[in-house]
Amino acid sequence: MKTTLTLIFCLLSACTQAADWPMFHGPDGENRSPDTGLMKVWPEDGPELLWKTDILGEGQSGFSTVTIQDGRIYTAGSKNGKSIVYCLTMTGEKIWEYENGEVWEKNYAGTRSTPTVDGDRVYDFTSVGELACLDAKTGKEIWRRNMLADYEGANIIWALSESIRVDGDRIYCSPGGKKAAIVALDKLTGEEIWATPSLGHSTSYASPMLFEQGGLKILATTYAKGLVCVNADTGELLFTYEHLQRYDINCCRPIYRDGHIFITNPGVAGVRNGASLLKITVVGRKASAELVWHNEHLDNLHDSVILLGDHLYGSSYDYLGGAFLCLDWKTGETVYEVRETGKGSFTCADGLLYYLCEKGRFFLIRPNPESYDVLSTWRMPDEGEGPAWAHPVVLDGKMYLRRGRFLYCYNLLPR
């Protein structure tokens, strides 16, 4: 009997072994949780609250979401004019905090980017350019540098928002300065590996993505005037593609599939911008892009578009005052648009979309290319200050929601 119980316990432990969510939008940046077996319909009062904490700074604090690795939660917030990295237990108690310089205190004050965890190190990039490498267990500083100062960059209208990408022995960052547009640094020392020359414009707000095509490893991100792609091994500029916006807002991480890249930016006051799909051609060590289609409706602001099957699902910004849209990936046709949700951000888990409106209303949506399919609606607690812009995270049967100094953890497993 004892042997049987031990075996059952081991099997259950193996099934519930914690996964990791080490960077913004998960381990591959695709914003898809590995979770299965989650509730398909929620109670009217929402999922069960397991715990909450209000220790993430003060006031509006910031818009950083969480990363999770090795049984610890990492995020960022602000207090007393400083940008703070927080490390928490899986039940919300503080393990350590680290002060990473000044914080942005102008329009929408607070932190933006989300800490990136890589093994025993954490990388935090602040709204004013401080890039710090910390010991993940203790929060002790290993190295730190200001990327705007080092590369003669100027901050942008709503402050730096890029979350750091780690790849092998290096990390990537986009200071958008006179000395360099994009740089690769040694992740252990912070020393420069390569630098892409200035594009003559500032950086923008997106986090980078990596893909390979035709034997060429490419880093794709945004700058003030659109998309920029460089050789990820050398930093050589491959091409730029203009995707203009009145205030140089290009916030969304590019999406790549089968030789094509999707990009989007927001419209402003009736001036349509929106989404474009580009065909990428690689010949030898060179690459170029040409337009396949453009759609003015999906004008996304907060990196809230996901590709599932042959359809894109996302949130508009100016179009319809904020709506939920479904687009055909191949043609760019708007399959449907729904104004109910408003502007928001989301993640994907167990075949469903977990959509958080910036005003705190929540929608559990089945991504159906045939029709808009809402399974449950609910409103998160109205406690935190500022818009609910931190992206939801779903991992190991739990959902993490952030608003201001509050972090909430909910149970998504059937009761």
Image: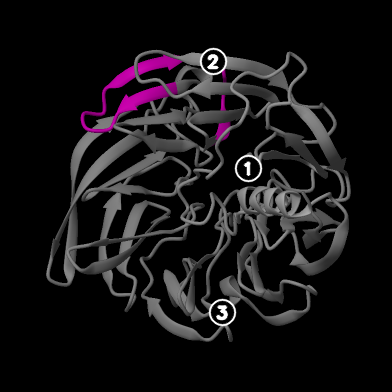
- The amino acid type, in three-letter code, at marker 2 is Val
The image shows residue 229 at horizontal and vertical percentages of 31, 61
Where residue 322 sits in the image (x, y, percent)? 52, 22
Q: Residue at position x 49%, y 79% from top?
A: 185
- Amino acid type at mark 1: Val
Between the C-alphas of marks 2 and 3, the distance is: 48 Å
Which residue is rendered at x = 60% and y = 56% of the image?
20
Residue designated by label 1 = 393
Q: Position of residue 13 (x, y in %)?
A: 68, 52
On the question of residue 72 being in view, the answer is yes
Look at mark 3 in the image and give the residue it sits on. Answer: 150
In the image, is residue 327 above or below residue 397?
Answer: above
> Dot 3, how many residues are within 10 Å of its Cα: few (below 14), some (14-19), or many (20+)?
some
User: Viewed as shown, does residue 306 lie left or right of 94?
Assistant: left
Tell me the SS state at disc 3. Answer: helix
Dot 2 alpha-carbon crowd within 10 angstroms: few under 14, some 14 to 19, many 20 or more: some
Q: Is residue 66 visible?
A: no
Between the residue at mark 2 and the residue at mark 1, the CA separation in whole angstroms equals: 19 Å
Q: Secondary structure at mark 2?
A: strand
The residue wearing badge 2 is: 374
Question: Is 166 in the magenta?
Answer: no
Q: How dense is the environment of label 1, judged by Cα within 10 Å: few (below 14), some, or many (20 and up)?
A: many
